[in-house]
Image (cartoon, rainbow, N blue to C red):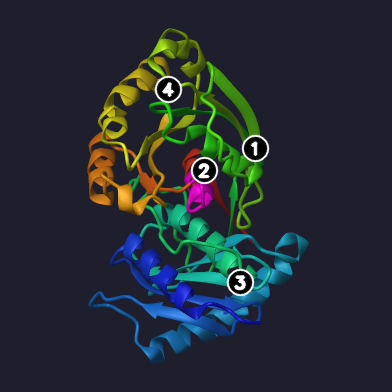
Protein backbone atom coordinates (compact mmCIF):
# COMPACT_ATOMS: atom_id res chain seq x y z
CA UNK A 1 0.00 0.00 0.00
CA UNK A 2 1.39 3.40 -1.03
CA UNK A 3 1.22 6.11 1.65
CA UNK A 4 2.10 9.78 1.23
CA UNK A 5 4.90 9.88 3.83
CA UNK A 6 5.60 13.57 3.26
CA UNK A 7 2.03 14.45 4.12
CA UNK A 8 2.16 12.16 7.16
CA UNK A 9 5.29 13.93 8.41
CA UNK A 10 3.74 17.36 7.80
CA UNK A 11 0.65 16.28 9.73
CA UNK A 12 2.74 15.02 12.67
CA UNK A 13 4.63 18.30 12.71
CA UNK A 14 1.37 20.24 12.98
CA UNK A 15 0.13 17.87 15.69
CA UNK A 16 3.29 18.26 17.75
CA UNK A 17 3.22 22.03 17.36
CA UNK A 18 -0.41 22.08 18.54
CA UNK A 19 0.23 20.05 21.71
CA UNK A 20 3.44 21.78 22.76
CA UNK A 21 6.33 20.68 24.98
CA UNK A 22 4.32 18.05 26.87
CA UNK A 23 4.25 15.94 23.71
CA UNK A 24 7.46 13.89 23.79
CA UNK A 25 6.81 11.77 20.72
CA UNK A 26 4.07 10.74 18.33
CA UNK A 27 4.07 7.35 16.62
CA UNK A 28 1.86 5.84 13.94
CA UNK A 29 1.74 2.06 14.23
CA UNK A 30 -0.15 -0.66 12.43
CA UNK A 31 -2.44 -3.12 14.19
CA UNK A 32 0.50 -5.38 15.03
CA UNK A 33 2.36 -2.53 16.74
CA UNK A 34 4.96 -2.04 14.00
CA UNK A 35 6.04 1.57 13.51
CA UNK A 36 4.89 3.24 10.27
CA UNK A 37 6.07 6.76 11.09
CA UNK A 38 7.24 8.75 14.12
CA UNK A 39 8.33 12.18 15.28
CA UNK A 40 10.22 13.26 18.40
CA UNK A 41 9.64 16.36 20.49
CA UNK A 42 12.13 19.19 20.77
CA UNK A 43 11.94 19.74 24.53
CA UNK A 44 14.81 18.93 26.89
CA UNK A 45 13.08 15.70 27.88
CA UNK A 46 12.70 14.52 24.28
CA UNK A 47 12.79 10.80 23.59
CA UNK A 48 15.76 9.37 21.74
CA UNK A 49 15.69 6.28 19.51
CA UNK A 50 16.55 3.88 22.33
CA UNK A 51 13.75 5.14 24.57
CA UNK A 52 11.23 5.08 21.73
CA UNK A 53 12.28 1.50 21.08
CA UNK A 54 11.35 0.70 24.68
CA UNK A 55 8.06 2.53 24.38
CA UNK A 56 7.35 0.69 21.13
CA UNK A 57 7.89 -2.58 22.97
CA UNK A 58 5.28 -1.38 25.46
CA UNK A 59 2.87 -0.33 22.73
CA UNK A 60 2.68 -3.79 21.16
CA UNK A 61 1.26 -5.70 24.18
CA UNK A 62 -1.09 -2.83 24.96
CA UNK A 63 -2.39 -2.91 21.37
CA UNK A 64 -2.82 -6.66 21.63
CA UNK A 65 -4.81 -6.25 24.82
CA UNK A 66 -6.86 -3.40 23.36
CA UNK A 67 -7.91 -5.29 20.23
CA UNK A 68 -8.74 -8.34 22.34
CA UNK A 69 -10.69 -6.66 25.11
CA UNK A 70 -12.48 -3.79 23.37
CA UNK A 71 -15.71 -4.58 21.60
CA UNK A 72 -16.29 -5.12 17.86
CA UNK A 73 -12.63 -5.84 17.09
CA UNK A 74 -11.68 -2.16 17.05
CA UNK A 75 -10.78 -0.31 20.19
CA UNK A 76 -11.57 3.33 19.48
CA UNK A 77 -9.55 5.32 22.00
CA UNK A 78 -7.64 4.44 25.14
CA UNK A 79 -4.95 5.58 27.55
CA UNK A 80 -2.16 3.77 29.33
CA UNK A 81 0.04 5.43 31.97
CA UNK A 82 3.48 4.46 33.24
CA UNK A 83 5.64 6.14 35.87
CA UNK A 84 7.42 8.11 33.12
CA UNK A 85 4.87 8.56 30.35
CA UNK A 86 1.21 9.02 29.50
CA UNK A 87 0.14 7.24 26.30
CA UNK A 88 -2.98 7.95 24.25
CA UNK A 89 -4.06 5.40 21.64
CA UNK A 90 -6.47 6.63 18.98
CA UNK A 91 -7.83 4.54 16.13
CA UNK A 92 -6.92 6.01 12.73
CA UNK A 93 -9.06 3.98 10.37
CA UNK A 94 -8.67 0.24 9.78
CA UNK A 95 -4.94 0.44 9.02
CA UNK A 96 -3.28 2.42 11.79
CA UNK A 97 -3.25 3.64 15.36
CA UNK A 98 -2.02 7.06 16.50
CA UNK A 99 0.07 6.78 19.67
CA UNK A 100 0.69 10.03 21.55
CA UNK A 101 3.44 9.93 24.19
CA UNK A 102 3.18 12.68 26.80
CA UNK A 103 5.20 13.69 29.82
CA UNK A 104 4.13 11.92 33.02
CA UNK A 105 2.76 15.15 34.53
CA UNK A 106 0.80 16.20 31.44
CA UNK A 107 -2.98 16.40 31.42
CA UNK A 108 -4.52 14.30 28.67
CA UNK A 109 -7.92 16.02 28.47
CA UNK A 110 -6.82 18.98 26.29
CA UNK A 111 -4.99 16.58 23.93
CA UNK A 112 -7.98 14.45 22.91
CA UNK A 113 -9.60 16.95 20.47
CA UNK A 114 -6.29 17.28 18.62
CA UNK A 115 -5.74 13.50 18.67
CA UNK A 116 -9.16 12.81 17.13
CA UNK A 117 -8.65 15.37 14.35
CA UNK A 118 -5.16 14.02 13.62
CA UNK A 119 -6.33 10.39 13.59
CA UNK A 120 -9.09 11.33 11.15
CA UNK A 121 -6.54 12.93 8.83
CA UNK A 122 -4.23 9.91 9.08
CA UNK A 123 -7.11 7.66 8.01
CA UNK A 124 -7.75 9.93 5.01
CA UNK A 125 -4.09 9.84 4.01
CA UNK A 126 -4.10 6.03 4.13
CA UNK A 127 -7.26 5.99 2.01
CA UNK A 128 -5.63 8.27 -0.56
CA UNK A 129 -8.20 11.00 -0.01
CA UNK A 130 -7.51 14.72 -0.20
CA UNK A 131 -6.54 16.09 3.20
CA UNK A 132 -4.85 19.18 4.56
CA UNK A 133 -2.12 18.54 7.16
CA UNK A 134 -3.03 21.75 8.99
CA UNK A 135 -4.27 21.27 12.57
CA UNK A 136 -6.27 24.34 13.63
CA UNK A 137 -5.80 25.80 17.09
CA UNK A 138 -8.58 24.69 19.43
CA UNK A 139 -9.73 26.36 22.62
CA UNK A 140 -9.50 23.76 25.37
CA UNK A 141 -10.12 23.90 29.09
CA UNK A 142 -6.65 23.16 30.38
CA UNK A 143 -8.04 22.82 33.91
CA UNK A 144 -10.27 19.89 32.97
CA UNK A 145 -9.28 16.62 34.61
CA UNK A 146 -11.89 14.10 33.50
CA UNK A 147 -9.26 11.44 32.80
CA UNK A 148 -7.22 10.62 35.88
CA UNK A 149 -3.78 9.03 35.73
CA UNK A 150 -3.70 5.32 36.60
CA UNK A 151 -0.29 3.69 36.30
CA UNK A 152 -0.28 0.39 34.37
CA UNK A 153 -4.05 0.53 33.96
CA UNK A 154 -5.53 0.44 30.48
CA UNK A 155 -8.52 2.77 30.22
CA UNK A 156 -11.09 2.98 27.46
CA UNK A 157 -12.19 6.52 26.60
CA UNK A 158 -15.85 6.99 25.82
CA UNK A 159 -18.51 9.67 25.86
CA UNK A 160 -21.11 9.74 28.62
CA UNK A 161 -23.93 9.60 26.09
CA UNK A 162 -23.74 7.86 22.75
CA UNK A 163 -25.70 10.37 20.69
CA UNK A 164 -25.93 14.16 20.64
CA UNK A 165 -28.11 16.55 18.66
CA UNK A 166 -27.24 20.22 18.37
CA UNK A 167 -28.62 23.30 16.66
CA UNK A 168 -25.79 24.80 14.59
CA UNK A 169 -26.06 28.28 13.12
CA UNK A 170 -23.91 29.98 10.48
CA UNK A 171 -23.53 33.74 10.76
CA UNK A 172 -21.70 36.26 8.59
CA UNK A 173 -22.25 38.74 5.79
CA UNK A 174 -23.99 37.74 2.58
CA UNK A 175 -21.87 36.11 -0.14
CA UNK A 176 -19.08 34.92 2.20
CA UNK A 177 -19.86 31.30 1.31
CA UNK A 178 -21.96 30.05 4.24
CA UNK A 179 -24.41 28.15 2.04
CA UNK A 180 -21.58 26.69 -0.03
CA UNK A 181 -19.86 25.52 3.16
CA UNK A 182 -23.02 23.75 4.30
CA UNK A 183 -23.56 22.05 0.94
CA UNK A 184 -19.91 20.98 0.77
CA UNK A 185 -20.21 19.47 4.27
CA UNK A 186 -23.63 17.85 3.81
CA UNK A 187 -23.50 16.79 0.14
CA UNK A 188 -19.80 17.20 -0.75
CA UNK A 189 -20.94 19.45 -3.57
CA UNK A 190 -20.24 23.02 -4.71
CA UNK A 191 -22.76 25.07 -6.67
CA UNK A 192 -21.15 27.47 -9.14
CA UNK A 193 -24.29 29.58 -9.57
CA UNK A 194 -24.69 31.68 -6.41
CA UNK A 195 -28.17 32.17 -4.97
CA UNK A 196 -28.56 34.21 -1.78
CA UNK A 197 -30.31 32.62 1.18
CA UNK A 198 -33.75 34.03 1.93
CA UNK A 199 -34.33 34.10 5.70
CA UNK A 200 -32.81 30.75 6.62
CA UNK A 201 -32.10 27.33 5.18
CA UNK A 202 -32.16 24.23 7.41
CA UNK A 203 -30.29 20.99 6.74
CA UNK A 204 -29.17 17.97 8.79
CA UNK A 205 -25.89 16.08 8.97
CA UNK A 206 -24.34 13.41 11.20
CA UNK A 207 -20.72 13.60 12.33
CA UNK A 208 -18.99 10.47 13.66
CA UNK A 209 -15.46 9.89 14.93
CA UNK A 210 -13.64 6.58 14.48
CA UNK A 211 -12.12 6.91 17.94
CA UNK A 212 -15.45 7.43 19.71
CA UNK A 213 -18.63 5.38 19.89
CA UNK A 214 -20.76 8.48 19.49
CA UNK A 215 -22.68 10.34 16.81
CA UNK A 216 -23.10 14.08 16.62
CA UNK A 217 -26.23 15.20 14.80
CA UNK A 218 -26.22 18.77 13.58
CA UNK A 219 -29.32 20.68 12.55
CA UNK A 220 -27.68 23.40 10.45
CA UNK A 221 -29.37 26.79 10.25
CA UNK A 222 -27.85 28.80 7.40
CA UNK A 223 -28.83 32.42 8.13
CA UNK A 224 -29.26 35.10 5.50
CA UNK A 225 -26.50 37.68 5.92
CA UNK A 226 -28.18 40.62 4.23
CA UNK A 227 -29.19 43.53 6.51
CA UNK A 228 -32.89 43.34 5.57
CA UNK A 229 -33.14 39.98 7.35
CA UNK A 230 -31.68 41.22 10.65
CA UNK A 231 -35.08 41.62 12.34
CA UNK A 232 -36.02 37.98 11.80
CA UNK A 233 -32.60 36.51 12.61
CA UNK A 234 -32.98 36.73 16.38
CA UNK A 235 -35.69 34.05 16.36
CA UNK A 236 -33.45 31.82 14.25
CA UNK A 237 -30.42 32.44 16.49
CA UNK A 238 -32.14 31.64 19.79
CA UNK A 239 -31.33 28.37 21.55
CA UNK A 240 -28.39 27.60 19.24
CA UNK A 241 -25.72 25.48 20.96
CA UNK A 242 -22.93 25.89 18.42
CA UNK A 243 -22.11 27.87 15.33
CA UNK A 244 -19.76 29.26 12.72
CA UNK A 245 -18.82 32.91 12.23
CA UNK A 246 -17.76 33.14 8.59
CA UNK A 247 -16.04 35.81 6.52
CA UNK A 248 -14.57 35.98 3.02
CA UNK A 249 -10.76 36.36 3.01
CA UNK A 250 -11.08 38.44 -0.19
CA UNK A 251 -13.60 40.83 1.42
CA UNK A 252 -12.27 43.18 4.11
CA UNK A 253 -15.74 44.46 5.06
CA UNK A 254 -17.01 40.94 5.81
CA UNK A 255 -14.05 40.49 8.16
CA UNK A 256 -14.58 43.82 9.91
CA UNK A 257 -18.24 42.89 10.52
CA UNK A 258 -17.35 39.69 12.41
CA UNK A 259 -17.40 41.37 15.82
CA UNK A 260 -20.91 42.71 15.11
CA UNK A 261 -22.06 39.22 14.17
CA UNK A 262 -20.45 37.87 17.34
CA UNK A 263 -22.41 40.34 19.49
CA UNK A 264 -25.67 39.64 17.64
CA UNK A 265 -25.33 35.89 18.10
CA UNK A 266 -24.34 36.10 21.77
CA UNK A 267 -27.32 38.36 22.51
CA UNK A 268 -29.64 35.56 21.34
CA UNK A 269 -27.64 32.53 22.53
CA UNK A 270 -25.17 33.62 25.25
CA UNK A 271 -23.88 30.09 25.93
CA UNK A 272 -23.17 29.18 22.32
CA UNK A 273 -19.87 27.56 21.31
CA UNK A 274 -18.42 29.24 18.20
CA UNK A 275 -15.52 29.04 15.75
CA UNK A 276 -14.30 31.66 13.31
CA UNK A 277 -13.88 30.60 9.68
CA UNK A 278 -12.05 32.46 6.92
CA UNK A 279 -13.50 31.09 3.67
CA UNK A 280 -12.48 31.27 -0.03
CA UNK A 281 -8.75 30.63 0.50
CA UNK A 282 -8.67 29.20 -3.04
CA UNK A 283 -8.72 32.84 -4.24
CA UNK A 284 -5.17 33.43 -3.01
CA UNK A 285 -4.39 36.17 -5.56
CA UNK A 286 -7.39 38.21 -4.37
CA UNK A 287 -6.81 37.71 -0.67
CA UNK A 288 -6.85 40.80 1.58
CA UNK A 289 -7.35 39.16 5.01
CA UNK A 290 -4.50 36.90 6.05
CA UNK A 291 -4.20 34.06 8.55
CA UNK A 292 -2.56 36.27 11.19
CA UNK A 293 -5.48 38.71 10.99
CA UNK A 294 -8.02 35.94 11.49
CA UNK A 295 -6.07 34.39 14.37
CA UNK A 296 -5.79 37.76 16.12
CA UNK A 297 -9.55 38.37 15.94
CA UNK A 298 -10.31 34.79 17.04
CA UNK A 299 -8.02 35.21 20.03
CA UNK A 300 -9.76 38.47 20.92
CA UNK A 301 -13.15 36.73 20.79
CA UNK A 302 -11.82 33.66 22.63
CA UNK A 303 -12.75 31.17 19.89
CA UNK A 304 -10.82 28.84 17.52
CA UNK A 305 -9.92 29.88 13.97
CA UNK A 306 -9.71 27.85 10.76
CA UNK A 307 -9.43 28.68 7.06
CA UNK A 308 -11.46 26.88 4.42
CA UNK A 309 -12.43 26.69 0.77
CA UNK A 310 -15.98 25.57 0.04
CA UNK A 311 -15.03 25.39 -3.65
CA UNK A 312 -12.22 22.84 -3.22
CA UNK A 313 -13.50 21.38 0.04
CA UNK A 314 -10.28 22.20 1.89
CA UNK A 315 -10.75 21.99 5.68
CA UNK A 316 -14.57 22.16 5.47
CA UNK A 317 -14.98 18.85 7.30
CA UNK A 318 -12.36 19.97 9.82
CA UNK A 319 -14.40 23.07 10.66
CA UNK A 320 -17.56 21.14 11.45
CA UNK A 321 -15.64 18.40 13.27
CA UNK A 322 -14.02 21.07 15.44
CA UNK A 323 -17.51 22.09 16.50
CA UNK A 324 -18.45 18.47 17.20
CA UNK A 325 -15.38 18.03 19.38
CA UNK A 326 -16.14 21.22 21.28
CA UNK A 327 -19.56 19.80 22.04
CA UNK A 328 -18.37 16.46 23.39
CA UNK A 329 -14.91 17.15 24.88
CA UNK A 330 -16.30 17.87 28.35
CA UNK A 331 -18.21 14.58 28.33
CA UNK A 332 -15.23 12.27 27.91
CA UNK A 333 -14.87 9.66 30.64
CA UNK A 334 -12.45 6.79 31.28
CA UNK A 335 -13.50 3.21 31.92
CA UNK A 336 -11.03 0.69 33.40
CA UNK A 337 -10.73 -2.60 31.54
The answer to whether the residue labelled 4 contacts the one labelled 1, judged by CB atoms less than 8 Å apart, is no
> Is residue 129 a member of the stretch shown in magenta?
no
- Look at the image and give the residue range highlighted in magenta: 310-319
Which mark, by number, is residue 126?
A: 3
x then y, percent, for residue 219: 61, 29
- Does residue 53 appear to the left or right of 258 in the view shown? right
The C terminus lies in which quarter of the figure? Answer: bottom right
Secondary structure type for disc 3: helix
Mark 2, residue position? 320
> Is residue 313 a member of the stretch shown in magenta?
yes
**Crowd band around label 3 with a 10 angstrom C-alpha radius: few (<14), some (14–19), many (20+):** some
Q: Residue at x 48, y 33 (%)?
A: 178
Q: Foreground residue, 42 or 47?
A: 42
Question: Toward which corner of the image does residue 265 lie, by quadrant?
Answer: top left
- Does residue 176 appear to the left or right of 156 in the view shown? left
Spot the residue most to the front: 193
Q: Is residue 154 visible?
A: no
What secondary structure is the stretch in magenta mostly built from? loop
**Crowd band around label 2 with a 10 angstrom C-alpha radius: few (<14), some (14–19), many (20+):** many
Q: Residue at x 38, y 47 (%)?
A: 306
Amino acid sequence: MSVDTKKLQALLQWYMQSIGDNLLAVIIVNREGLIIDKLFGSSEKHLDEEIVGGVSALVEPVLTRITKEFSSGSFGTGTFDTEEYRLIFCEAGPEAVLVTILDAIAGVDPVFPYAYLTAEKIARIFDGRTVSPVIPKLISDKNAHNIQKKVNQLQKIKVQSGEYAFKLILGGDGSVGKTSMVHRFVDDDFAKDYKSTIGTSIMKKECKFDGLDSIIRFVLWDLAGQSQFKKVRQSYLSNAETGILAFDVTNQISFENIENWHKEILSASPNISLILVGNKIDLEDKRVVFRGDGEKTAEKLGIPYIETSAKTGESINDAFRMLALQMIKNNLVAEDI
